[in-house]
Amino acid sequence: MTTRKTTVFYGVLIAIASIAVGMVIASQWGLPQASSAQAINVPAANTAALNGPIDAQTFRNIAKAQSPTVVNIRTMARSRGRELTEFFGGQDDLLQRFFGQGQGQGQGQQGRRRQAPDREVPPQEGSGTGFIIDKAGFILTNNHVVEGADDIRVSLYGGGRTESYAAKVIGRDSLTDTALIQLAEMPAGPLQEAKFGDSAQMQPGDWVVAIGNPFNLSHTVTVGVISALGRPLGGVPGREQPMLQTDAAINPGNSGGPLLNVRGEVVGINTAIYTDSQRAANIGIGFATPINPIRDLLPQLRNGKVTRGVIGIRVDRDAITKDVAQTLGLPANTGAMLSTVIPGGPAAKAGLEPGDVITEFNGRPVADSDALVNMVVGTKPGSSVPVTVYRKKAKKTLNVTVDELDLDAEQGRQASNRRDPVEEPTATGFGMEVGPITPEIARELDLPRGRGGAVVMDVERNSPAFNSGIRPNDVILEVNQQEVANVSQVQRELQRAEAGQPVFVLIWRDGESVFVTLRKR
């Protein structure tokens, strides 16, 4: 072989090797390959009026036609700060998450669940539902179903028990609790896409169908009606989203599945249930995220990032009454009253003040506070928009430059503003230290609502508490068969014990009540 031929041969060989190495690196690091770039096909929404008779075949036909669009999702997280069972994919009590103790909490350091020292954390498994929206393998589900997952497996309708396909997250949105995932490996047969309806058409009393994976019972079909509209819920405190309420049975594992109208079109994503610790399942109150705003987000989800506007205000959520409007000199009882203007934010820079009432935003009338919030988040960051306000019975027009919403930073500021003073652990005399039960602890430990007096924060080796088997993260429910509600009550009941006298303690651990006996030295 001549020198020139040798040079050409090795040059070609190096080029081929470089391409191969590049493809391997891309597949390992999750980097996009140019040949696989693909735009998502945004499904068209059927806005035709819902009408026609309901007969014995209606729901049977919906189940038969739409079940192939629904998938079961299983996830695995090998190392996480938050457990998958904290969300709808597991067997948790979502009353804690969306109401009561779970609402508006969970961002600060205080009360964060601590792992026992030298204790290996097992992988966390979760399950949920999704539905196919594109034959290229794009699937919509809830963000909390796949958040933090290291492995995602998708099972299709009609597949065998062991048949599943790997999937990857394309884009997530915590505000609407939505995620777009895509199959990383495709089945042999074609995929069936779900059809989109118009969630704005839905009214209380309208029939709906839910299909999902409750308690890993794949492709379960339930039927109910829309119970109410605009229920303010969501995974981001202070930015709750208007949800559809339904009595169609929804249970843990249904999360991310479709809520369908009588034409079999998706009008919502099943997201949460109102339940209690005794049942931890459906009691006839479920919630679905309306599909219309999700459909609008699909191009951004496909690009991997959702961008929203913010102007740095907090609004009074109560509607403006006629007497308030008259006192403020408003032309009508519409608009959004500002309760807070964030210092240094776009609104503050534009001259807006607390007590101002915004009646127009970017040339559009503002009906109420919710309408203003929707207008702002839907505005492209960097835009300069006119804002009409009433201040001291005078009408003003100001220009505000919309900034980009950073949910993590916003929630961090809110958490620092509302964080309680850090309390020192309280000694008990039994070799363990206890602390107060914060909403975050109650949620993470799946604590029954209204139960518990203190959480064990530390246990001294070879102490009475250690020898009895008590460990960090145990929650003390009772002392000597007396329920305790706070740290003071726990300490008082324990201090009543004399040396050598048995003390009976009921604790909560890993979803179960455990009875232990302590003896004071």
Image (tube, helix red, strand yellow):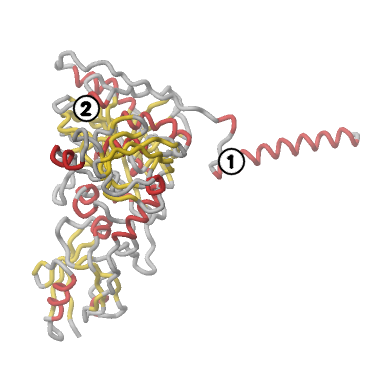
Image location of residue 451, percent across then percent down? 15, 60
Q: Nearer the viewer, residue 331 or 374?
A: 331
- Quadrant housing the N terminus: top right
Question: Tag 1's secondary structure?
Answer: helix
- Checking the image for residue 231, the label placed there is none
Figure quadrant of residue 288: top left
Which residue of the protein is positioned furthest toward the top in this rendering? Answer: 52
Image location of residue 101, percent across then percent down? 21, 55
Image location of residue 398, percent across then percent down? 38, 39
Which residue of the protein is positioned furthest toward the right in this rendering? Answer: 2
Which residue of the protein is positioned furthest toward the left in this rendering? Answer: 482
Count residues near mark 1 (Cα–Cα under 10 Å), then give few for <14, some for 14-19, many for 20+: few
Q: Nearer the viewer, residue 404 or 103?
A: 404
The kind of residue on which mark 2 rests is Val
Image: 94 above or below 453: above
Residue sitting at x 15%, y 28%: 204
Name the residue beneath numbered marker 1.
26
Q: Is residue 129 left or right of residue 493?
A: right
Residue sitting at x 34%, y 24%: 194
Q: Nearer the viewer, residue 516 or 52?
A: 52
Figure quadrant of residue 243: top left
The kind of residue on which mark 1 rests is Ala
Count residues near mark 2 (Cα–Cα under 10 Å), then give few for <14, some for 14-19, many for 20+: many
Residue sitting at x 33%, y 46%: 126
- Checking the image for residue 209, the label placed there is 2
Q: Give the alpha-carbon distance from disc 1 to disc 2, as whole Å.
A: 41 Å
- Quadrant housing the C terminus: bottom left
Residue sitting at x 21%, y 81%: 429
Image: 8 above or below 411: above
- Please indicate, yes or no, whether residue 411 appears anywhere in the rendered image: yes
Q: Earlier in the sequence, mark 1 or mark 2?
A: 1
